[in-house]
């Protein structure tokens, strides 16, 4: 009898990525095809099903070897029923994703949001391997998050658990409005977007910084300038790290995870960023909630989504 395999699908606005994993979370094969979002919801659903079958076919394995299929997707979801209520970058409204795929693939299907799924990927086969309780931050355009307890995703009443970017952490006098409509969210200062905004504000104020010579500032430009000794850039990175570390102090006394995992583009700043985060975390967290706790970089990169989606089959 062949070893069972697990199929994970990461649905994006322009591309659908499929990964085939073994029971240990090792990625055996990947496939990527166009979402074809402009052709409507029926085409998107059909493509997910077709690409899943094609990815397995390309491994040389039989569809009978598939234990189940997991899907990660951004948006507002009815997770128990696998319905996509709405998605910001996809032409899907009240789409019965789980029911459709189970009918067309003949396998059990599990659906969850993309941030939770990426966190599960890291917990199952990445930086959280072997650790039952971990919390994952993804520092990109926004700040995504996921909470894993006893190896499983914490979803909450309305699937809103793990929205770490929307912890209100910035004091009122410094706060700006977040895209969610609330004030002072972590996302406003610790995402790539927040870092870029703070840099542009500094340039507009006339602060003496090398960033004033950069035409289209990126978060990497800010980090690189900080590493090179630019004081303005260093203050911006320090502020992003400060609120990340402080948010972890809050999470630590609620969940007390063994490991915090940080991924996304901003995390590529490396130890320059991580050292500052750890310092703040230790400053604001009671000792009992810091013992044995690690703050580490993510390992899976862009593969976290498909690996985590495959992991839904085993950990849902």
Image (cartoon, rainbow, N blue to C red):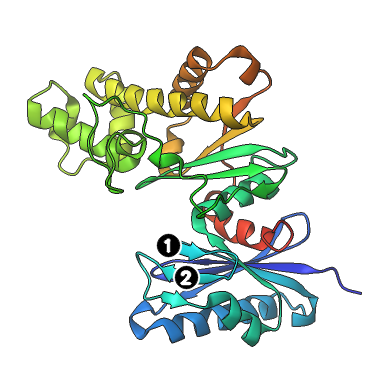
- The residue beneath circle 1 is 75
Numbered tag placed on residue 177 in the rendering: none
User: Residue 268's quadrant in the figure?
Assistant: top left
* Residue identified by numbered label 2: 84
Image vertical order of residue 284 relative to residue 86, above or below:
above
Residue 312 pos. (x, y %) = 66, 60
State which quarter of the image contains the C terminus: bottom right
Distance Cα–Cα, label 2 vs label 1: 7 Å
- Relative to 286, say whether 18 is above or below: below
Left/right placement of residue 159 relative to residue 288 reads: left
Give percent across and percent down for residue 73.
49, 64
Q: Residue at x 59, y 80 (%)?
A: 99
- Asked if disc 2 and disc 1 are in contact, CB closer than 8 Å, the reply is yes
Pick the residue in front: 187 or 167: 167
Residue 1 image offset from top left, x and y in percent: 92, 74
- In the rendered view, does 215 fall on the left or right side of 129? left
The residue lying toward the viewer, choosing from 20 and 142, is 142
């Amino acid at each position: 009898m062949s070893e069972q395999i697990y199929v994970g699908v990461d649905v994006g606005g322009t591309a659908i990525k499929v990964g085939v994993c073994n029971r240990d979370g090792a990625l055996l094969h990947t496939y990527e095809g166009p979402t074809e979002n402009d052709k409507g919801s029926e085409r998107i659903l059909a493509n997910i099903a077709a690409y899943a079958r094609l990815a397995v076919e390309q491994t040389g394995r039989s569809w009978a070897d598939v234990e189940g299929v997991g899907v990660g997707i951004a948006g507002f979801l009815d997770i128990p029923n696998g319905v996509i209520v709405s998605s910001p970058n996809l032409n899907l409204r009240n789409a019965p994703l789980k029911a459709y795929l189970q009918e067309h693939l003949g396998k059990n299907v599990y659906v969850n949001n993309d941030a939770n799924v990426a966190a599960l990927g890291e917990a199952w086969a990445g930086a959280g391997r072997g650790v039952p309780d971990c919390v994952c931050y993804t520092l990109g355009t926004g700040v995504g998050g996921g909470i894993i307890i006893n190896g499983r995703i914490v979803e909450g009443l309305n699937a809103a658990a793990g929205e770490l970017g929307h912890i209100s952490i910035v004091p009122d006098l410094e706060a700006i409005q977040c895209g969610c409509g609330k004030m002072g969210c972590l996302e406003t200062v610790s995402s790539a977007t927040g870092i870029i905004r703070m840099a542009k504000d500094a340039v507009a104020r006339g602060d003496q910084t090398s960033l004033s010579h950069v035409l289209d500032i990126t978060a990497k430009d800010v980090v690189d300038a900080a590493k090179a000794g630019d004081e303005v850039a260093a203050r911006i990175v320090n502020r992003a790290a400060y609120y990340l570390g402080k948010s972890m102090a809050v999470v630590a006394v609620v969940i007390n995870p063994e490991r915090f995992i940080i991924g996304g583009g901003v995390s590529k700043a490396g130890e320059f960023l991580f050292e500052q985060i750890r310092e703040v975390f230790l400053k604001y967290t009671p000792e009992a909630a810091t013992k044995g706790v690690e703050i580490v970089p993510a390992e899976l990169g862009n593969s976290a989504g498909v690996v985590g989606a495959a992991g839904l089959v085993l950990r849902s």
